[in-house]
Structure formats: C-alpha cells, structure tokens
Amino acid sequence: MVRKADRPKHIVESALKAAADSGWARLTLRDIATAADMSLADVHAVYPGKPAILAAFLHDVDAAVLAGADPASSDESPRDESPRDRLFDVLMRRFDALNAHRAAVVNIMDAQACDPLSALAMAPRVFCSLSLMLEAADIGASGVAGALRVKGLAAVWLATLRVWRGDESPDMAATMAALDRNLGRAESLARRLPPLFSGRFSSKAAA
C-alpha cells in the first residue's frame, strides 16, 4: 500500500517507467494505475489524466534545476559568469535531469510529435518552465522583452532537444556542442535587437 503522501511521486515514477517500457501514446490512466499497483480511482484522485502527470514530471524537473541553481550551494557567485554561460549551465542541468528518464522522455516526444493537439496543450507549461530557466540564469523573463526571450529560448531548447534524444554519450558532448551553437545563434539575433535584449543576453562569443 502506497502512503497517501507518497502517491503523487509514485504515480509519476510509475507512469515514466510504463512510458519507457510501452510508449506514451497508447498508455492509459488504467495502465498507469496497474503499473503503480493502485486503483484507478486513487490515481484519478491525484492526477485526472496523463497531461496532469506530465505536468507534474515537468515540475519535478524544474525543481531539480532550480535546486542546482541555488547560489548557497556554490562558492562561486552566479554574477561571476556571463548570462550566456549561466544559461548554458542551467539548460545542461535540465538535460541531466531528463537523462534519468531518457527512454520515457523520448517516447513522450515521439507521441506528441504525432499528436499536435496534445503538444499544443502542453505548450503553456513548457513556456512556464523555460521562463523559470531564464530566471534561474538571472535573465529577465517578464514583460514584452521577457516574453520574446522565452520564445527565443524555446527555439534553442527544441533544437537542442532533438540532438539530445540521439546523444547517448556519457558526457553528452553532442548535446553540449549543439546547445553552445544554438545559444550562439540566439545571442547573434539578440544583438540585432538592442532595445529588448541589450545587457541581459549578451556575453562572449561561442568558442
């Protein structure tokens, strides 16, 4: 019997394991309840559907990234790094968090690629996560300028995510190279929009 307080985490972990084993597209809430060894009613009471479970997983990933961004956990001040370097570190922590559930995440990506409506429904949650990633890197994400930065970061993230899904190397070298390259392109674009981005997304050129 899973304790009530442990049910949310247990359900998410069970859903990810089932997604890794059987895919996400045809996975039902009943399948997830079976994997969690819980009744459908108990699972539904916590998460009414798969989108809610996926949103909870993204929240856990956000929490892991933000915990790693805590200045108190490092002797080095975030201000000692350029905005681009801080953003690179934050996004690589996000890929590290996703790596723990690589098979499930890849299967979820495949399922959403075939279900545009589902992907569209999750878009606001993804944009919320990316806004947090900017904040974690001490880059403004509010107002019109912030909204544009979030959209620019979404392009960087999606382009790099496609590389990550095929990068099974221990050090994620291909992912790091792709992220650096994509951030460089975003930085180049930002320089053309000084009123919106000047001073907040500028840093040294890509190595």
Image (tube, rainbow, N blue to C red):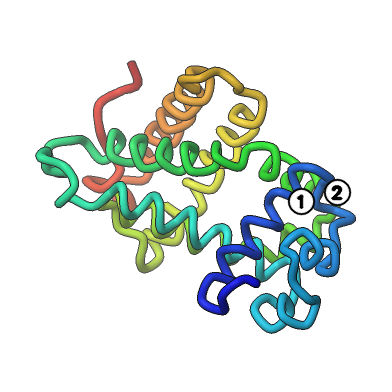
In the image, taking residue 52 as reference, residue 185 lies left or right, namely left
Q: Is residue 178 left or right of residue 108?
A: left
Q: Which residue is mark 1?
A: 18
Q: Residue tagged by mark 2? A: 114
Residue 168, disc: none
**Eyeballing the image, is 199 above or below 144?**
above
Figure quadrant of the N terminus: bottom right
Q: Which residue is at a point 59% across and 35% down the rendered structure image? A: 159
Q: Secondary structure at mark 1?
A: helix
16 vs 162, nearest the viewer? 16
For the C terminus, the quadrant is top left
Identify the element where label 2 is drawn: loop
Image-based side of 12 in relation to 138, left or right: right
Position of residue 90 measured from the top left corner of the image (x, y, whole percent): 36, 42
Label 2 vs 1, first from the N-terminus? 1
**Residue type indicated by callout 1:** Ala
Q: Nearer the viewer, residue 134 or 21?
A: 21
The part of the image, by quadrant, that contains residue 35 is bottom right
In the drawing, does residue 87 fall left or right of residue 83? right
Q: Is residue 4 positioned above or below 60 on the image? A: below
Residue drawn at x 74%, y 43% as measured from the top left: 20
* In the foreground, 116 or 40: 40
Distance in Å between CA atoms under marks 2 and 1: 19 Å
